[in-house]
């Protein structure tokens, strides 16, 4: 693996600089979460509004527990689903050094342990969590492949290249309320996956933008206009298809999953959006995608991406 690169990245992070690194969901733009000046740099470079909090990434559960108190259900979810694409909103301990900037002054901070070897190596022996949003400009499409990263970002920020993100959709964000769970952002872990672990709990979907500020209506946007649930393709549109059907673009045809597999589709989605943005088509058309399991997350992303 990129051993030297990871050591260099750690040095930069320790001196308050930013680093772009791969995770199993999307690339992250990381900074020392305890250093308010470093965290400020993230908001500035992403042009991200301060009210939209940032997820903290940890090397292991012990590091999480130094900063947060976990109740029984939180501990169960953490043990079963980490490392992995689930973000738990946890309450900070009074002695935590995590900057208030990551959570817009709230004591409730989003936490996760990523399931990616480079990310885990980077976090190991760092002795502070990494505040890391997705490595894209605010409102723009997240990135799952090195080649899709904004040139303006990688010119300025030290970047560790990884394989294509295994999952391709961001983490699912949840908050435990006593014995039940509020789901704030749909993601790579489905509600059913969570219920398999928390079998006695109920899940309430709260994906409005007041409680989960990241759920802004416009998000994940491409430069080109997107139409979703299309039945016919227009002459100037490139197509992102799903499964087998008669849809066809005259310019460019991509298929998220010919077999109709939602996992495969999730992995391909953001890369295909970037690809069509760079291609010859004027606009982007996306075929209907089943609104079940991971398809719910895919539909959430393309719906927001299609907002003007
Ligand atoms: O998979 C992921 O989660 C990726 C990788 C890099 O870990 N990160 C990511 O970060 O998607 P970002 O900043 O693009 O999205 C974070 C989401 C936002 O919707 C934000 O509002 C929500 O998590 N969030 C973070 N902290 C929160 C908090 N304390 N309370 C409520 N929502 C929070
Ligand atoms: Mg994001």
Image (tube, rainbow, N blue to C red):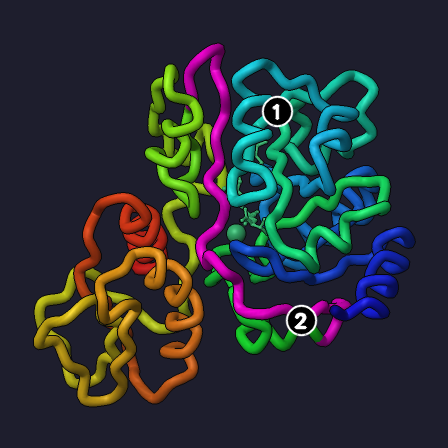
Query: How far from the left and from the top, in percent, is residue 63?
Result: 77, 32
Name the front one of labels 1 and 2: 2
Alpha-carbon span between mark 1 and mark 2: 30 Å
Relative to residue 240, is residue 83 drawn left or right?
right
Rendered image quadrant of residue 57:
top right
Image: 213 above or below 221: above
Of pointers 1 and 2, the one earlier in the residue sequence: 1
Which residue is depicted at the point 83% across and 29% down?
Answer: 97
Q: Is residue 171 covered in magenta?
A: yes
Local SS, label 2: loop
Q: Quadrant of ligand 1?
A: top right
Relative to residue 57, is residue 225 drawn left or right?
left
Label 1 close to label 2 by CB (< 8 Å): no
Which residue is depicted at the point 63% across and 61% down?
Answer: 22
- Quadrant including the N terminus: bottom right
Q: Residues within 10 Å of mark 2 (few under 14, many from 20)?
A: some
Name the one closer to the observer, 248 or 220: 248
Query: How far from the left and from the top, in percent, is residue 253?
Result: 25, 82
Which residue is tagged 1? Answer: 90
Local SS, label 1: strand
Image: 275 above or below 100: below
Name the one closer to the observer, 51 or 88: 88
What numbered label is drawn on residue 161? 2
Q: Is residue 109 covered in magenta?
A: no
Query: How far from the left and from the top, in percent, is residue 145?
Result: 54, 71
Q: How many marks?
A: 2
State which region is magenta: 155-181
- Quadrant including the C terminus: bottom left
Which residue is depicted at the point 77% across and 70% down?
Answer: 2
Which residue is depicted at the point 46% across and 56% down?
Answer: 167
Q: Residues within 10 Å of mark 1 (few under 14, many from 20)?
A: many
């Amino acid at each position: 693996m990129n051993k030297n690169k990871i050591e260099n990245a750690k040095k930069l992070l320790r001196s308050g600089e930013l680093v772009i690194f791969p995770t199993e969901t999307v690339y992250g733009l990381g900074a020392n979460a305890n250093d308010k000046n470093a965290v400020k740099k993230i908001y500035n470079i992403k042009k991200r509004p301060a009210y939209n909090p940032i997820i903290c990434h940890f090397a292991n559960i012990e590091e999480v527990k130094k900063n947060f108190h976990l109740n029984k259900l939180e501990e169960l979810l953490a043990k079963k689903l980490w490392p992995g694409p689930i973000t738990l909103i946890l309450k900070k301990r009074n002695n935590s050094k995590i900057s208030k900037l990551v959570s817009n002054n709230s004591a409730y901070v989003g936490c996760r342990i990523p399931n990616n070897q480079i990310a885990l190596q980077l976090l190991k022996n760092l002795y502070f969590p990494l505040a890391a949003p997705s490595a894209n400009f605010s409102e723009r499409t997240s990135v799952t492949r090195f080649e899709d990263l904004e040139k303006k970002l990688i010119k300025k920020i030290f970047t560790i290249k990884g394989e294509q993100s295994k999952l391709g959709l961001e983490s699912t964000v949840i908050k435990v309320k006593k014995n039940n769970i509020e789901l704030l952002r749909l993601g790579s872990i489905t509600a059913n996956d969570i219920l398999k672990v928390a079998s006695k709990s109920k899940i309430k979907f709260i994906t409005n933008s007041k409680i989960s500020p990241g759920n802004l209506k416009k998000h994940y946007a491409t430069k080109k206009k997107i139409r979703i649930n299309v039945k016919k393709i227009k002459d100037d549109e490139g197509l992102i298809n799903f499964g087998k059907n008669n849809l066809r673009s005259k310019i460019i045809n991509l298929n998220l999953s010919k077999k109709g597999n939602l996992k495969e589709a999730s992995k391909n989605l953001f890369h295909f959006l970037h690809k069509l943005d760079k291609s010859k088509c004027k606009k982007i058309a996306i075929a209907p995608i089943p609104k079940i399991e991971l398809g719910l997350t895919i539909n959430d992303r393309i719906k927001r991406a299609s907002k003007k």
